[in-house]
Image (tube, rainbow, N blue to C red):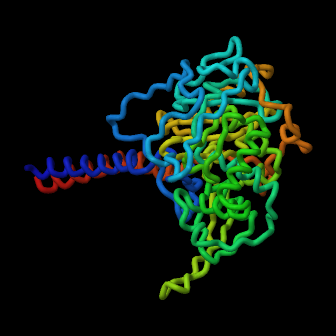
């Protein structure tokens, strides 16, 4: 082969490799943080935290084309879809939970009993790229429901059920109390923030780990103080019942799938709205990063060393990428798929969006939430298809106004951050073609010298 041909082909191959690496090797958007098993991704630029795992990818190129799931025939009216694994098989001797009763009429208004897409009269079509099987947009302050799909359909919450655990814990635990980490905390399944035996953690730090990073080890440490998993779950279910979230039944404190686990897009909005009555909850869902303690060396392991503290970051990508984002909670399990609840503010209005049984395609769950928030903010200010509960118990009529997240340290609204690796990706995309041109010129010059 002639020298010129060798140079040209080498230059093209190298330039193509650089460009392909830029397109395939660097993600265009940081993974959203699912909760439950295989969950919790750090914020853009944040250091990794112990226990982080990579969320599932959107699959190979042979994945069938995306279609929005149809719920017009109310397939989940009484219970969630069939599980894909054995996580919901009752323990030996334990009964199989029966489906929760279906309230009639539907809580929230007549249209909340519909199972397909429910929109105000004259509203435009909903965004096209929504894979969530069920979703809802509501007004955080007034409780108006603006738009929904299968609002009372029953699905699994994954780690979004930690909102219920947070309500119970924040109203009953001493936040300054120091808790000693245990091996049982460290051994829990799913996402862990990195609690270790002998570590010293205040309940405030455990709540940071629970709400910001979806730590199942933090959920275990909190549930232990509430009397153990069964008592904690009972208290969570009592909160749901008091709030008239009648589609909701927790089976685990963390959101790991268990027998009878259930919620709905409507209920998740109710739980989130109630949690927003607690100022610390509003503060923590809006917090981007905090320092978390380490734990001492294990004396039973020769040569073991102390684990130093490290920063932990909020796993909600909407917080970094959506103007006016207040914060929220992510979730993921194999059975629940992607779940999400979050709020944002625009022009004095605060909206909540919930997603259940979503997927990472065609766009990430936080991006689907952003589309639905944009849609909700664009509706008429009096748009309404239903209402969140406001009667029936003292808990539904809080004695304090809904909490507002504190401003950032400098008092400003943060600019939406570029997703992780995007700057390097853009630089490589520009540099790749330039490198090809430079190599071609070098090859041509070398050929002329030898000609």
Where is residue 63, by image quadrant?
top left
- Give the side of residue 350 with respect to residue 186, left or right: right
Residue ID at (82%, 49%): 278
194 vs 108: above or below: below
Residue 257 in the image, given as x and y percentages of width and height: 54, 47
x and y percentages locating residue 99 in the rendered image? 60, 34
User: Is residue 156 in view?
Assistant: yes
Q: Is residue 437 left or right of residue 390?
A: left
Task: Measuring from the top left, give residue 377's x and y in whole percent.
Answer: 72, 28
Is residue 30 at least partly visible in the picture?
Answer: no
Name, please, the residue furthest toward the right.
399
From the viewer's perspective, tell me whether residue 15 is left or right of residue 252: left
Question: Which sits in the foreground, 283 or 218?
Answer: 218
Q: How many marks?
A: 0
Task: From the viewer's perspective, tell me whether residue 438 is left or right of residue 372.
Answer: left
Please name whichever residue, 125 or 250, is drawn nearer the observer in this view of the structure.
Answer: 250
The residue that appears at 43% across and 28% down in the rendered structure is 66
- Name which residue lies at 68% across and 41% down: 342
> Whole-percent x and y of residue 116?
59, 20
Quarter-wise, where is residue 216 in the image?
bottom right
């Amino acid at each position: 082969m002639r020298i010129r041909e060798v140079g040209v082909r080498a230059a093209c191959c190298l330039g193509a490799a650089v460009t392909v690496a830029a397109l395939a090797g660097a993600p265009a958007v940081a993974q959203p943080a699912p909760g439950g098993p295989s969950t919790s991704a750090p914020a853009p630029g944040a250091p990794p935290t112990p226990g982080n795992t990579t969320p599932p990818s959107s699959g190979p190129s042979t994945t069938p084309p995306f279609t929005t799931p149809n719920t017009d025939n109310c397939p989940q009216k009484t219970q969630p879809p069939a599980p894909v694994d054995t996580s919901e098989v009752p323990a030996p001797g334990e009964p199989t939970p029966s489906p929760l009763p279906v309230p009639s009429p539907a809580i929230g208004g007549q249209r909340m009993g519909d199972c397909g897409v429910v929109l105000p009269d004259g509203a435009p079509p909903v965004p096209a790229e929504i894979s969530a099987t069920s979703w809802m947009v509501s007004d955080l302050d007034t409780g108006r429901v603006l738009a929904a799909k299968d609002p009372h359909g029953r699905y699994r919450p994954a780690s979004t059920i930690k909102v219920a655990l947070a309500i119970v814990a924040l109203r009953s635990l001493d936040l300054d109390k120091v808790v000693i980490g245990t091996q049982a905390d460290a051994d829990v399944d799913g996402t862990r923030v990195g609690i270790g035996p002998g570590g010293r953690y205040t309940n405030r730090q455990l709540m940071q780990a629970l709400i910001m990073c979806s730590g199942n080890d933090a959920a275990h440490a909190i549930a232990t103080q509430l009397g153990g998993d069964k008592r904690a779950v009972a208290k969570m279910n009592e909160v749901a019942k008091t709030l008239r979230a009648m589609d909701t039944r927790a089976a685990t404190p963390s959101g790991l799938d268990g027998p009878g686990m259930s919620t709905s897009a409507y209920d998740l909005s109710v739980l989130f709205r109630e949690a927003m009555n607690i100022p610390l909850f509003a503060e923590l869902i809006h917090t981007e990063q905090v320092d978390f303690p380490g734990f001492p060396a294990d004396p039973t392991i020769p040569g073991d060393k102390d684990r130093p503290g490290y920063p932990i970051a909020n796993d909600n990508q909407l917080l970094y990428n959506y103007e006016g984002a207040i914060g929220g909670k992510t979730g993921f399990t194999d059975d629940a798929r992607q779940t999400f609840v979050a709020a944002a503010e625009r022009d004095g209005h605060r909206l909540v969006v919930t997603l259940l049984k979503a997927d990472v395609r065609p766009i990430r769950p936080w991006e689907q939430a952003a589309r639905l928030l944009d849609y909700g903010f664009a509706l008429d200010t009096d748009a309404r298809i239903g209402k969140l509960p406001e009667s029936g118990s003292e808990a539904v009529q809080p004695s304090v106004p809904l909490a507002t997240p504190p401003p950032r340290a400098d008092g400003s609204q943060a600019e939406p951050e570029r997703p992780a690796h995007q700057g390097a990706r853009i630089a490589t995309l520009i540099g790749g073609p330039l490198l090809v041109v430079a190599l071609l010129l070098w090859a041509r010059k070398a050929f002329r010298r030898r000609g």
